[in-house]
Each structure stands twice: as C-alpha cells, then as structure tokens.
Image (cartoon, rainbow, N blue to C red):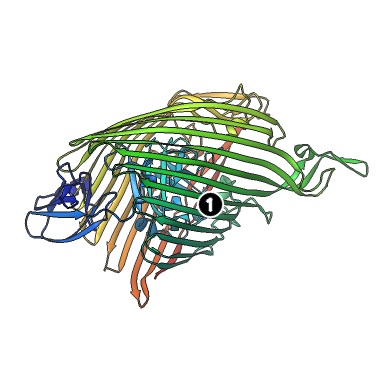
Amino acid sequence: MALLCACAVMAVAQHALTVRVTQGENDQVLQGATVQIVGTPYVVQTGKDGLAKLQNLRQGKYEVLVTFLGYEAATRSIVLESDLVENIRLAPTVFLAEEVIVQATRASENSATTYRNIDKVQLEKNNLGQDLPYLLDQTPGVVVSSDAGAGVGYTGIRVRGSDPTRVNVTINGVPLNNPESMGTFLVNLPDFVSSVDNIQIQRGVGTSTNGAGAFGASLNIQTNKLRSEPYAELDNSIGSFQTLKNTVRLGTGLIGEQFSFDGRLSQIKSDGYIDRAFSDLKSFFLTGAWHGKNSLLRANVFSGKERTYQAWNGVPEEMLAINRRYNEFTYQDQTDNYTQTHYQLHFSQALSEKTHLNAAVHYTRGAGYYEEFREDDNFQRYGLSDVEIGGITISSTDLVRRRWLDNHFVGLTYSLGHQVSQTLGLTLGGAYNEYYGGHFGEVIWAKYASDGQLGDRYYEDDAVKKDFNIFGKAEFRRDQLAFYADLQYRRVIYSFLGYDRNLVQLDQTDYLNFFNPKIGLSYRFADQSQWYASLALAHKEPIRDDYVESSITSRPRPEQLYNLETGYRISGNKYRLGANIYGMYYKDQLIITGEINDVGELIRQNVPRSYRAGLELDAQWQPARNFTWSATAAFSENKILDFTEYVDLHDYSGQHSITYDRTNIAMSPDFVGSSEIAYRVSPSLELAWISKYVSRQYLDNTSARARSLDPFFVNNLRISYTTSYLAAKQIGFTLLVNNIFGTEYSSNGYTWGHLNEDGSRAYYNYYYPQATANFMLGMQLKF
C-alpha cells in the first residue's frame, strides 16, 4: 500500500510528451510500437493513430527509445520544457529480426497472459557462476534450491509451488524438459546464461508451447542474436567454497554483410557448501548464421558436461544441529556424470510484409551415469547367484554399481504467422518430437564376484516417446480492445520394454490425446494502463516413474488444469506496477499419498480436487534517476480437498489411512516476497540490496508443522563497478555477498515414516541446507 501511495504522489501532472511513430516515405503511422524513456520503467504503446502519450514528466532532458518488430530501433534525445509532440520515423531493418524465432510461443504486450521479460542486461548483473534458477529468484512466486547449497550443481526452481516437472522450458522454441521425467536438469548446461539474450517467464498455463505441459509456468529462452561488430569478452569469478568460473566469448560480427559466427567456452568448479558436494562443469556454445533481408538461417551447437558428487539425499533432521553440512555419502566416486549436446538448425523467411515462416530441426544426444557404493546388497537384486566359501553361503556383498541413461531426442518445430490486417493476426504452429531412452545398470566392482562378469547389465529398459502438437492462435484488436484465442491439440505415445532396476519386466504402451483451448481479453485504457483476463485448459501426462512403478490397472490418470488469470498493468515515468489474481483448479492432480499400488510400489496417486489461488504483485519505483526499488509479492492458498494419507504399520504388514479436509499442498508457501533496492552512486558505481522471504513450506500434504520447513528471510549485497581503459570497451567488477547475515535455512526437503506399535507416528525429515554467508567476486572484460 505504501508503494501504491508513493506511485500516486509521483504521478502529479506536469508535462506531456506525445510521440508519433511512422514509417516509410509517406509517414504511415505504426500501431503497437513500443515507446520507452530510457533508464525509467515508463513504457507505452502507440495506438491506431500512431501516437503514444507520456504524461507527468518534469522539465529536463530525456532519451526516448522506440522499437517495433521488423524495424530498426530509434533513440531520440528530447529536451522537454512544455507539452511537446515529437515525430519519430522508423526504418525497416536490413535483416530479418531474430525475435520471430520465438514469437509464436511468446506472449506479446497485448496478450492476456501473466508474464515477465528478462533481458541480457538484467541477467548479466548476477551471472557469476550460480545456475539459471538463481538468476530468476527475484521474479514473482519463485523459490529456488540447491542440493550442494551454493547454487552450483544440481539446482531447482518452483513457481507458484509447482515443481520443475511442471515448468515447461524451451530454448529457441525447442523443448528442453526430459520427455520421460519431465524435469529440466540445467546442471547439464552450465553457464548457459552467458549465451542467452532474453527469457520470458509465463506463470500459469500461458500460451501454447512445445513439449511438456506448463502446469505452473513456462520459461521461453532465446539465445544470442546478431551482434554486428566483432567482440571478445572474458568473465572470471572466484568465491566461497573454492568456486571458480571462467568464460570466454568471441564473435566475428557481420562478415560480408551476410555471415556471423559466435562462440563461448566455460568452466565452473565448486566444492559446494555441503561436504564433498563438488561440481566440475564444462560447456561450450557455437552459433553461425546467414542473414538475408528476408531470410535467416542459424545453426546452434551447444554442449555441457557435468561431474557432481551426490548430495541428493539431503541432511537428516537430527544432524542439522550437529553438522548442517553433513553428507552421508563417503565413497570417493559417489558421483553423477552426464554429457548432453544439442544441435539446432533454424530457418526464418519473410514470405511477405505480413507473413513469416519459421522452422527448426533439432537433435539432442545425452549419455551418462551415476555411480554409487552399496553396502551388503543382496545378490538377487542383480540377477546373481549366492556364493559359497568354506561351506558358508553368502547371499549379499558390498558392491559398486552404475545406472546409465543413454538417450536421443530429435524433432522439428514450425510456425507460420500472418497479419491479415492491423486488427487481426493469425499464427499456426506446432512440433513433432521423438525420444529414445535407454536405461540400464551394471556392477563394476563387488567384494564377492558371484557368477557375473564386471560390466554385465543387470537390468535394461528401452523407452520410446512420441509427442505431436499443433496449435492455432488468433489475435483480434479493435481500438483499445484485444481478444485472443489459442487452440492446441497434443498427442503422446509412450512405450517401454525391458526390465527395470528392480528386475521387474516392463511392457507398457500408453496413447494420450489432449485438447488445450485458451481464450483471453485485454483492454488498454487512455492512460496506457491495461486490464486483461484469460481462461485456459491444460493437460499433462504422468511421468516415467508413474508408469514404471505401476501396472496397467493401477496406472495414474493424466492431470487436468483449469487456469483463470486476471490482472492490471500500469506504468508511469517513475513507476511500473502489475497486479494479477489467479486460480488454478486441478482435476486428478498427481501427488504422493503414501499408498502402495497393486505391484507393491509407492507412487503418486490422483486426488480428485485441488487448487492454487492467489494474488501476485510486481512493481518498480524510481523516485530519482539514481535510485530504483523493485519488489514482488505472491500471496496464495494451495489446497487439496478430501485428502487421504496412507501410512505404513510398524511391521510393514499393512497401511493405516488418515483423512484430511482442505489440507495444504506440499512445498507450496502461502507467501513469497522479494525486493531489490539499487542506488547508483555514480555512473560507474551501483549498490544493490537484495532480499527474499519465503513462508512455511510443508514437506508432505498433511499440514503438520513437525514435517515442514521454517520460513526464511535472506539478504544479499551486490556492488558493481564499471569503467573502460585503453582497448577495453568495458571493465566490470561485481561483488555479490549472499546471505550476508548468515541465516541458517533450508529451501527444500522431504519426509517419510511409519506408525509405531503404540500407534504414535515415527517420521524422518530430510533437509537441503543452503549456504550461510558467502561471496562471489567477478571481473568482466569486453573488447
């Protein structure tokens, strides 16, 4: 409320700047062009008359930036002494704009969708080695976590309480989520942010996209675009826990007015906050493009190789007070090892001034394993015979095993956009992808060798998943009113044959057909503020474990989600504010209930009714040009109606059921807030105070405080200094002190348990402690 009142005070009328945006020799007006006062949150769009009115401006000098897809951006310095009308003419771009590559799956400024755009400048501020989720931590409703505790290695992100398997991620429109687990393992692409131009986060179902269904959010990532001048950049960071990051970026600029080539090479190492939880990460990114006036052909090759020591199990609750950096693994090679390489070929063609075609083919190759030591494991689990020594039968042994994933992901994406008129735009798009996943395990060492050979595969399972989708979008705009419809059909075929890790034969095939309609309405008021509302239906198939650990008769059903969003956006010369109310109503949401199915496995089960509903605020206030306050707040209620929990008896002879009414969904906090206060001491020096608060999170779906994560409030300090010297266009230094007050907290965890003989509850909580006070110091050189 204080922020809203302050914004109102700052909006006292003074002078108005009206910008008229035109193009061509006849100065034809451009509707929908974006007009921004540089260095402020003030952004408006031109109406059908080509006019954008910037109000409540004080006298002074302003830099005005005008952008429109397909035209060269124009910047104009304007001295404002009284009301003024300024005409700015845009020239068509020499090359086809690369934004068209992701345009089909993105929300536009008039879309009735809840979203946030993050550009390269914002990403670079904190890109010192921590993984991508940590660079998105200041967006509404986001909670991030790290297995190793320091943001390097295995990390995770939750949006509106939804886990990573429910967050759709695409890179240039190509799906990144693993088709079987639905998760996104960004550890396989270390330092990928250094090759990213911008990211759009859509919360809720969002617009139609490719790949896994978006049940909490979608991340639409676009990699580097054309840089017309040659460049060389070097980033080096050092920090706590022996963290080290080295990045080299090179680019040729435009060669012969048609070709460009860019590359990046990165290495990140860290010992981790948790004992022995080290990370050794390497990656590269190569891209080459041919740029034509009406065509674009771009090839991307990027790869990541990771070796991380396992910290997956977390820290038992009883160890937190003794040693919160405890790691129960002690075997030297208890590591995860994986290499993933992506190949993308994108083609865009402007068929006419009003029609654009985009197509891409892609291939991803992944292979790797995790190695683990097993103490006194039964021979039966590995298809091995008991051993007899001196007349004594030995049925178990210490051993080391590796579990492999060897996969291929190939497909194509496409979109065709046609602007029928200034009021109507149509888009047709979709994708077809195939995934081939090989799962197998092998014993590489055993105290007693039995009758097997080292390297024999004790289980093997081949899976195939085919994913087809097609969508059509229509956006109709009349004066201040805009309406859109988005219809998607998706077909999934998933089959696997072989033996799982428990030596159970698998042979299942599932055929799924989903229809996902979306409609929305937005209205832009005279003051350039906007109201919007949308309704969407989405479906999502079960993940691999739901299939593997069930039979055809006990297989969970697909999930269904009705998503209602309505919000209001407004910006002025010193403020920007977005408020959004949402409701996400699930049918057959899949959660852990504790129940054992007909094959004796503990898997996720469908619950008939559950929901998430809340209010999100996203604001920025700039009372002075050297002072900016950005803040977010997400209030939510996350409930399961009529929930039944199943708890094992003490001797595991059966289960006891407990019924709950309107219980909280696990790992879904009622409040998430963030703040960044930035003060620019001089043009070269900026100080920023960054804060994050997350309320209580429950480890299971029973709302028991004994099985929960305490609320936490964490503060970081960032100091940035930039200058130039001789041949260096820019020399930048950034000091980031994380958790400056040394708060002890955990942002993720899990629990399990049983009933004792006397009927009391025994439970075992595991936590993922995050690092106390730590720092990262980075230096960037740009030539």
- Above/below status of 246 relative to 621: below
Q: Position of residue 8 (x, y in %)?
A: 16, 47
* Outermost residue toward the left in this view: 82
Helix, strand or loop under label 1: helix
- The quadrant of the rendering that contains the N terminus is top left
> Percent from the top left, x then y, of residue 740?
41, 59
> Which residue ends up furthest to the bottom in the rendered image?
726
| Left or right for 18, reference 279 | left
Q: Residue at label 1?
A: 187
Q: Please name the residue shown 70% across and 38% down the image.
A: 460
Q: Is residue 450 left or right of residue 460?
A: right
Hey, what amino acid is under mark 1? Val
> How many labels were placed on the picture?
1
Q: Quick one: quadrant of the C terminus?
A: bottom left
Name of the residue lying farthest toward the top = 553
Is residue 539 positioned above or below 4 on the image?
above
Viewer-nearest residue: 590 or 406: 406
Residue 110 in percent (x, y) is at 26, 40
Looking at the image, which is closer to me, 422 or 563? 422
Which residue is outermost to the right? 390
Any part of residue 742 in sight: no
Label 1, residues with CA under 10 Å away: few <14, some 14-19, many ≥20: many
